[in-house]
C-alpha cells in the first residue's frame, strides 16, 4: 500500500506524454515545402522565353575530358561544366553614378559589336590570363535586367545574368552548368583532343527566367 | 513532468542524501529507522522511475559518463555525416540525375523516420541526438545538392527551412544542441534576408551588423515571449511563449554567441561595417563594444549564476583580448615585453574576477526567474 506522501506526489506528476504526431507532421511539412519551393523555382526558371543562349564547342571548356583519374571516378564534366566569365571595365564614371556595390545585372556575350570592342581593348596579357578559352565577356551592366534585354539575351550569343556590381569589380552568379542525363552520353562520346583541339561539337547553354543555366543541346557541327 | 525537471529532481535527491549523510556523521541530525526507510524507499522509487522514463543520472559518476556520451554522440553524428557525404561525393557523378535527386530528397525523410524509431526504442537522449543531427545534415545536403544540380541562386531562405526543421526536431525530442543549431540557422536567415533588403547580394556580401541585430533578437526572444506571449493572443501563442521560455538558456547562449562572433568580426574586419566612418574608427568602436559586451555578459551571467553563459562570456573576453593584444603589439614590442605584459594582464583578470566573485557571494540573484537556471545551466 502506498503512503499518503507517495500518492500525493504521483498525483502531482502526470506520466510523461510521448510526443504527439503534430511535431512529426510539421517536420515532414517543412521538408516537403522546402523541396516543393525549390522545384517550383526550377520549373519557373525553365518555363517561358530564355533570358540567354550561347553556343560553345567542346574546345572552349578547358577541363573537357571524359577520361577517368585512375580511381574509376569520372572527371567533373560528366556532372557539370564550368563557365568562366571575364571582361567589362566598368570604370570610374559608372562608379560615381552607381555608388558602392549593388545588386544588378550584366550582359555576357561571345561575339557581336560590344564584345569585339571589349575583347580588342583587353591587353595581350589579359587575353591570356583573364580571358578564358570560352572568351565569354561581360559587355554591359545595369541595375535592371529589362534595360539589357533589347540588346542582349535573344541573339543566340549572349545572356543577361544577375551580378554584384562595384567600382571596377563585379561577380556574375551561376558559373556551374549541370549536365543532364540525356546529355551525358553525347558528351562522353566526344573524343578528347587535348590542347590542339578541333571543334567537332556544339554545346548550347541556356539561361532561364531566374537566370539559372543548363546545358540545352549537344550537336555535331555540320549535322544540323 | 519533463526530462529536465526529472533530472533536477534527481540531483536534488542525491544532494539531499549526501548532506544528510554528513549531518548524521557529525551528529547534527538523524532520522529514525522507520523515517529513514520511508524516505529512502520513496526516493529509490522516484529515482528508478526517472531513470526508466527519462534516463536520468543516478550518481555524479553517471553524470560524468553522460557528458562523455554526449560528446561521443556529437562526434558520432559528425563521423556518420562525413561518411555519408564522402561516400556520395566519391560516387556522385556516376549516378544519374534522377537517382541523385531521389537520394537527396529521400535522405532527410529516411533520417527523420530513423530518428523517430530511435526515440521510441531507446530512453537515452544520446542516440536520438545523434540521429537528429544526421537528419539535419541530410536536410542540409538535400537543399544544397538540388541547388547545385539546378544551379539555383544561393538564398538565405534555405536557412529558414533548415532552422525551422532543427527547431521542430529540438522541441520534439528535447535536444538542446539541435535547438542551438536551429537558432544559428535562423540568425543567418534574418541577417541574410536583411542584407538582401538593403540591396546587397547575399552571400557575396555579408553585413555583420545585421547578424548582430538577429543575434540580439534571439537573445531577447524569451524576454519578449514572457512580456507579450503569455495569454495575449490565444492558447497556441501561449504554448509557443512557454516553449521559448522553457529553453531560454539555449536562446540566451545562441544570442550571446552570435553577438560575440559578430562583434569580433567587425572589430577585425571593419570594411564589412555599414558605419560610414574610417576603418580604424570602426575597428576601435567595435573593439570597445566587444569588450564592454563581454564584460557585461560575465557580470550578468555571474549574477544570474548561469554557469555556461559566464564561461562563454569570459572565454570570449579572454580570447578577444589576447587576439587584439597580439594584433596591436606583437610587431612593435620585443617578445619578452609582450609576454611580460600578457602575464600581468592575466594576473589583473584573476584579481578582477576574484573581486567580482567575492562581491557576488554577498548578493542574491537579481531575477529569481533566471536564478533557477543555475541548475540547468550545466546541462547545456
Image (cartoon, rainbow, N blue to C red):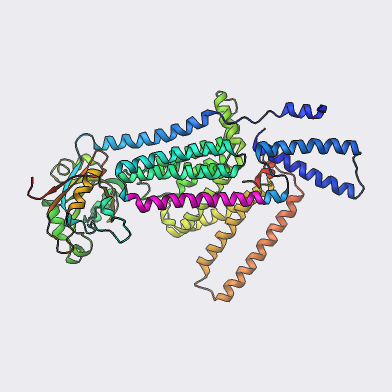
At 68% from the left and 57% from the top, the residue drawn is B353
Residue stretch rendered in magenta on the structure: B65-92
Q: Which of A46 and B160 is in front in this view?
A: A46
Q: Quadrant of the N terminus of chain B?
A: top right
Q: What is the number of callouts on the image?
A: 0
At 28% from the left and 35% from the top, the residue drawn is A43
Q: Which of B9 and B199 is in front in this view?
A: B9
Q: Measured along the vertical axis of the image, is residue B106 above or below residue A6?
A: below
Side (left or right) of B360 relative to A18? right
Side (left or right) of A80 relative to B301? left
Residue B296 visible in this rendered orientation of the protein: no
At 47% from the left and 55% from the top, the residue drawn is B265
Tell me where residue B198 sits by quadrant. Answer: top left
- Picture coordinates of residue A68, whole percent (x, y): 27, 58
Q: Measured along the vertical axis of the image, is residue B23 above or below residue A49?
A: below
- Picture coordinates of residue B131, whole percent (x, y): 52, 43
Residue B227 visible in this rendered orientation of the protein: yes
- Picture coordinates of residue B377, whole percent (x, y): 65, 45
Q: Which of A146 and B57 is in front in this view?
A: B57
Q: Is residue B76 magenta?
A: yes
- Picture coordinates of residue B33, whole percent (x, y): 90, 39
At 71% from the left and 36% from the top, the residue drawn is B49
Q: Nearer the viewer, residue B348 or A132?
A: A132
Q: Is residue A95 magenta?
A: no
Q: Measured along the vertical axis of the image, is residue B222 above or below residue A68?
A: above
The secondary structure making up most of the magenta span is helix
Amino acid at each position: 500500500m502506498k503512503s499518503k506522501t507517495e500518492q500525493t506526489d504521483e498525483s502531482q506528476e502526470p506520466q510523461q506524454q510521448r510526443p504527439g504526431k503534430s511535431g512529426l507532421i510539421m517536420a515532414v511539412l517543412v521538408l516537403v515545402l522546402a523541396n516543393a519551393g525549390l522545384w517550383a523555382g526550377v520549373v519557373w526558371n525553365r518555363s517561358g522565353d530564355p533570358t540567354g543562349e550561347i553556343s560553345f564547342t567542346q574546345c572552349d571548356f578547358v577541363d573537357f575530358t571524359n577520361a577517368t583519374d585512375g580511381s574509376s571516378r569520372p572527371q567533373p564534366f560528366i556532372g557539370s561544366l564550368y563557365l568562366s566569365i571575364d571582361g567589362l571595365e566598368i570604370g570610374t564614371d559608372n562608379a560615381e553614378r552607381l555608388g558602392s556595390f549593388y545588386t544588378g545585372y550584366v550582359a555576357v556575350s561571345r561575339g557581336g559589336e560590344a564584345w569585339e570592342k571589349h575583347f580588342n581593348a583587353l591587353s595581350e596579357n589579359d587575353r591570356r590570363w583573364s580571358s578564358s578559352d570560352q572568351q565569354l565577356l561581360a559587355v554591359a551592366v545595369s541595375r535592371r535586367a529589362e534595360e539589357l534585354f533589347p540588346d542582349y539575351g535573344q541573339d543566340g550569343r549572349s545572356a543577361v545574368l544577375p551580378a554584384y556590381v562595384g567600382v571596377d569589380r563585379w561577380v556574375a552568379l551561376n558559373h556551374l552548368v549541370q549536365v543532364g542525363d540525356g546529355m551525358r552520353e553525347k558528351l562522353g562520346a566526344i573524343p578528347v583532343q587535348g590542347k590542339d583541339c578541333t571543334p567537332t561539337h556544339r554545346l548550347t547553354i541556356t539561361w532561364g527566367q531566374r537566370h539559372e543555366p543548363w546545358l540545352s543541346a549537344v550537336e555535331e557541327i555540320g549535322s544540323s | 513532468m519533463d526530462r529536465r525537471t526529472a533530472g533536477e529532481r534527481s540531483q536534488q535527491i542525491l544532494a539531499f542524501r549526501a548532506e544528510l549523510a554528513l549531518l548524521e556523521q557529525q551528529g547534527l541530525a538523524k532520522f529514525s529507522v522507520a523515517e529513514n526507510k520511508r524516505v529512502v524507499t520513496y526516493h529509490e522509487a522516484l529515482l528508478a522511475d526517472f531513470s526508466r522514463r527519462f534516463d536520468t543520472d543516478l550518481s555524479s559518476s553517471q553524470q560524468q559518463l553522460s557528458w562523455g556520451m554526449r560528446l561521443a554522440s556529437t562526434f558520432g553524428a559528425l563521423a556518420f555525416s562525413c561518411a555519408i557525404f564522402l561516400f556520395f561525393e566519391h560516387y556522385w557523378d556516376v549516378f544519374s540525375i534522377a537517382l541523385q535527386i531521389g537520394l537527396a530528397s529521400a535522405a532527410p525523410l529516411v533520417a527523420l523516420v530513423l530518428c523517430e524509431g530511435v526515440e521510441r526504442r531507446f530512453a537515452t537522449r544520446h542516440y536520438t541526438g545523434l540521429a537528429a543531427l544526421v537528419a539535419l545534415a541530410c536536410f542540409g545536403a538535400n537543399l544544397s545538392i538540388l541547388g547545385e544540380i539546378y544551379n539555383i541562386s544561393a538564398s538565405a531562405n534555405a536557412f529558414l527551412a533548415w532552422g525551422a526543421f532543427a527547431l521542430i526536431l529540438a522541441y520534439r525530442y528535447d535536444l538542446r544542441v539541435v535547438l542551438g543549431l536551429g537558432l544559428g540557422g535562423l540568425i543567418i536567415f534574418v541577417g541574410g534576408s536583411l542584407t538582401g533588403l538593403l540591396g546587397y547580394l547575399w552571400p557575396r556580401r555579408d553585413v555583420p551588423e545585421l547578424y548582430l541585430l538577429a543575434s540580439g533578437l534571439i537573445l531577447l526572444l524569451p524576454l519578449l515571449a514572457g512580456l507579450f506571449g503569455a495569454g495575449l493572443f490565444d492558447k497556441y501563442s501561449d504554448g509557443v511563449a512557454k516553449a521559448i521560455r522553457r529553453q531560454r538558456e539555449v536562446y540566451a547562449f545562441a544570442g550571446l554567441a552570435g553577438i560575440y562572433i559578430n562583434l569580433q568580426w567587425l572589430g577585425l574586419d571593419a570594411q564589412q561595417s555599414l558605419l560610414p566612418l574610417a576603418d580604424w574608427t570602426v575597428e576601435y568602436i567595435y573593439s570597445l563594444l566587444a569588450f564592454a559586451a563581454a564584460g557585461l555578459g560575465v557580470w550578468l551571467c555571474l549574477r544570474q549564476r548561469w554557469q555556461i553563459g559566464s564561461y562563454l562570456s569570459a572565454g570570449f573576453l579572454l580570447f578577444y583580448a589576447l587576439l587584439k593584444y597580439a594584433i596591436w603589439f606583437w610587431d612593435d614590442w620585443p617578445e619578452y615585453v609582450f609576454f611580460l605584459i600578457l602575464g600581468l594582464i592575466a594576473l589583473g583578470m584573476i584579481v578582477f574576477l576574484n573581486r567580482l566573485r567575492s562581491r557576488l557571494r554577498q548578493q542574491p540573484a537579481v531575477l529569481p526567474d533566471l536564478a533557477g537556471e543555475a541548475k540547468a545551466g550545466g546541462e547545456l
